[in-house]
Amino acid sequence: MKILPSLRSFRQGWRRGLVWTVLPLLFLSACHIVPDTGRRSLSLIPLREEIALGASSFEEIKEKETISTDREKREMVERVGRRIAAVAERDMPGLDWEFVLFEDDAVNAFALPGGKVGVYTGLFRVARTEDELAVVMGHEVAHVTARHGNERMSQYLLVSAGGIALDTALRRQEAETRQMALMAYGAGATFGYILPFSRSAESEADELGLYYSARAGYDPREAPRFWERMAELSQGGSPPEWLSTHPSHGTRVRDLERIMPQAMRYYEEARGQR
């Protein structure tokens, strides 16, 4: 059956209208407002699925990794984490928070959607007090409430969809031309979109996490000192910032110093209440 020119034009126009009206509305409806910063983030994955995915992944990690038997450090991680999570409850209530200390020399920690936080014993090489540990715990709790994991997955979905669309548009081109175009698209998406987002998400978690830890009564002035010690530990072994998923230690220190007056106000309020 042939499509009349007028009907074909109508359908093509309707499809273009769908792209420019319905899809933007979809993105707007899928936005999440990040606490304190007020930034709108893209969250295409429903919260229930996001939480289930985080819980499932965390169970797999606990089965594969060794959970520390150091009772003192485990209790410290649990105590600091719960105290900060109680402050964050106002931003994302009802989460089943879990804080686990894993036996590993890595000076690191991580957070999964839904309130699952893992800390490696190697972190205690730098974080020696509760105030110092709160720098990291606040940062990880902030990743959860800002829904950075959802935003990262949503962005990968968009990038993948863009790659499929590009490959389809070039389906009549030679294989070499298509391959070069897709490689250029992948590099552009990585260095122009994925990595900059990752760095901005880390900076946002630094800011929101500092506010959380300060509201929980932990001294925010320990944060710049913590990152200065991290810089000393890395001894310049980090890649250039534009190639990294994280801001440089120097950038983090400068950003934390910039927001320190606001964090100190929260800290003084918390001390007054206690």
Image: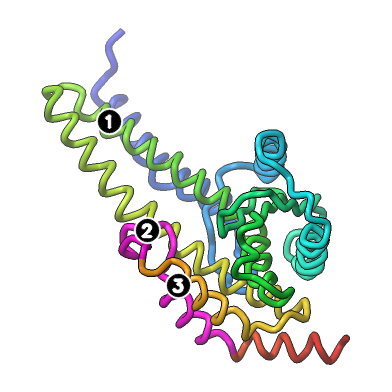
- Assess whether residue 192 is covered by the magenta stretch: no
Residue 15, horizontal then vertical, whole percent = 37, 34
Q: Residue at x 77, y 76 (%)?
A: 216
Residue 210, horizontal then vertical, whole percent = 63, 76
Q: Is residue 266 visible?
A: yes
N-terminal of the pair, mark 2 or mark 3, is 3
**Screen quadrant of the N terminus:** top left
Residue beneath disc 3: 231
Badge nearest the viewer, 2 or 1: 2
Q: Is residue 133 above or below residue 113?
A: below
Left or right of 140: which side holds 176? left
Say which element carries label 3: helix
Q: CA distance from mark 1 to mark 3?
A: 60 Å
* Mark 1 neighbour class, 10 Å CA radius: few under 14, some 14 to 19, many 20 or more: few
Span of residues in magenta: 237-260
Residue 243, horizontal then vertical, whole percent = 32, 57
Residue beneath disc 2: 244
N-terminal of the pair, mark 1 or mark 3, is 1
